Image (cartoon, grey):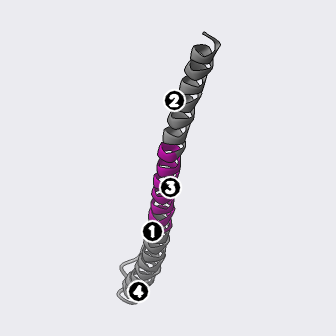
């Protein structure tokens, strides 16, 4: 009877060890996948930041161009005495 109980305990321990190993393997795989996905997200964020900075540069250049156009129009208006 004692042998049966010992064998049963050993059998359960082996089953638990097997399940734990399976969980470890799955968790390792999931962890690797999460690391890969985080790297992808970080790369995407760098791209978004670069695009935002590029947009800011474009806005600044356009503002400078508009300011020059306004100055030229004001100078033309003064020369033609259109300003009151």
- The residue carrying mark 4 is 72
Mark 2 or mark 3, whichever is nearer to me: 2
Q: Earlier in the sequence, mark 4 or mark 1?
A: 1
Which residue is at a point 57% across and 35% down the rendered structure image? 17
Determine whether the residue tagged by mark 1 lies in a helix, strand or loop: helix
Near-viewer residue (33 or 45): 33
- The residue carrying mark 1 is 47
- The residue carrying mark 2 is 15
Question: In the rendered view, would you say 46 is above or below 69?
Answer: above
In the image, residue 49 lies at what x, y percent? 50, 66
Q: Is residue 38 magenta?
A: yes
Q: Quadrant of the N terminus?
A: top right
Range drawn in magenta = 25-47
Q: Is residue 7 left or right of residue 30?
A: right
Q: Earlier in the sequence, mark 4 or mark 2?
A: 2
- 3D distance between C-alphas at marks 4 and 3: 61 Å
- The residue carrying mark 3 is 32
In the image, residue 11 lies at what x, y percent? 54, 26
User: Circle 2: is it few (<14), some (14-19), or many (20+) Cα within 10 Å?
Assistant: few
């Amino acid at each position: 009877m004692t042998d049966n109980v010992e064998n049963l305990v050993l059998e359960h321990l082996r089953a638990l060890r097997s399940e734990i190993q399976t969980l470890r393997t799955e968790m390792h795989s999931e962890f690797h996948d999460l690391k890969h996905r985080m790297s992808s997200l970080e790369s995407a964020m760098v791209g978004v930041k670069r695009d935002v900075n590029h947009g800011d540069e474009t806005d600044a250049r356009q503002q400078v161009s508009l300011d020059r156009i306004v100055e030229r129009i004001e100078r033309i208006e003064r020369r033609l005495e259109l300003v009151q």
